[in-house]
Image: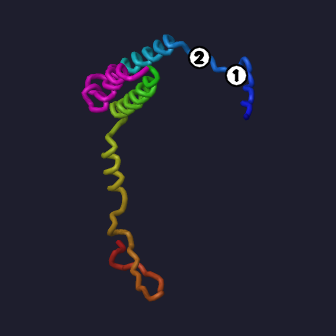
């Protein structure tokens, strides 16, 4: 019969300090209230935006329904959504679509770029003279 090897006792400082359930619960509730304050601080438009609605669902309904172990992940997801809303609602100058349109106007149109004609005969391609402006 085989003998089971003896287990070595753990050193006294190697065990991680456990956090009590009540302390963890209070910390998560504090984070939840901070996220809710951030969301309501964005104004009424943020709460009517689909992203804001989803963040509210995460902060309220999903947070209450899930276990305490899963609540940190729910709050992280809500924090990410609120961060997106802050970027969307922040006054950052003209809309990005306008900048793209201005950039397109400054670039040369595709017809103005000299096209290369390939002769497929082993010779080097030469620019088409009619396309150069």
Query: Which picture quadrant has residue 59?
Result: top left
Residue visible at 29% across and 22% down in the picture: 43
Residue 120 inside the magenta-drawn segment? no
What span is colored magenta in the figure? 38-67
In the image: residue 11, left or right of residue 77? right
The colour mode here is rainbow
Residue found farthest to the front? 1
**Quarter containing the N terminus:** top right
The image shows residue 52 at horizontal and vertical percentages of 31, 28
Residue 56 vs residue 103, the one in the foreground: 56
Contact (Cβ within 8 Å) of mark 1 with mark 2: no
Mark 2: few/some/many CA within 10 Å (<14, 14-19, 20+): few
Residue visible at 31% across and 29% down in the picture: 54
**Quarter containing the C terminus:** bottom left
Mark 1: few/some/many CA within 10 Å (<14, 14-19, 20+): few
Residue 65 inside the magenta-drawn segment? yes
The image shows residue 31 at horizontal and vertical percentages of 44, 18
Q: Tell me the residue that label 1 is attached to.
A: 14
Q: CA distance from mark 1 to mark 2?
A: 12 Å
The image shows residue 5 at horizontal and vertical percentages of 74, 30
Residue visible at 35% across and 31% down in the picture: 85
Query: Which picture quadrant has residue 62?
Result: top left
Query: What is the magenta segment's predominant secondary structure?
Result: helix
Q: Tell me the residue that label 2 is attached to.
A: 18
Residue 76 vs residue 88, the one in the foreground: 76
Residue 71 vs residue 100, the one in the foreground: 71
Residue visible at 33% across and 31% down in the picture: 89
Q: Determine the secondary structure under disc 2.
A: loop
Query: Does residue 95 sit above or below 130 in this rendering?
Result: above
Q: Determine the secondary structure under disc 1.
A: loop
């Amino acid at each position: 019969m085989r003998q089971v090897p003896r287990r070595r006792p753990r050193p006294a400082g190697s065990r991680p300090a456990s956090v009590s359930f009540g302390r963890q619960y209070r910390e998560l509730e504090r984070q939840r209230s901070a996220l809710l304050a951030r969301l309501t601080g964005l104004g009424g438009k943020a709460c009517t935006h689909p992203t804001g609605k989803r963040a509210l669902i995460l902060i309220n309904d999903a947070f209450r329904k899930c276990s305490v172990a899963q609540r940190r992940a729910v709050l992280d997801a809500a924090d990410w959504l609120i961060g997106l809303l802050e970027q969307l609602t922040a006054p950052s100058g003209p809309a990005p679509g306008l900048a793209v349109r201005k950039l397109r106007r400054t670039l040369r149109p595709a017809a103005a770029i000299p096209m290369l004609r390939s002769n497929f005969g082993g010779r080097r391609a030469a620019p088409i003279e009619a396309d150069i402006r």
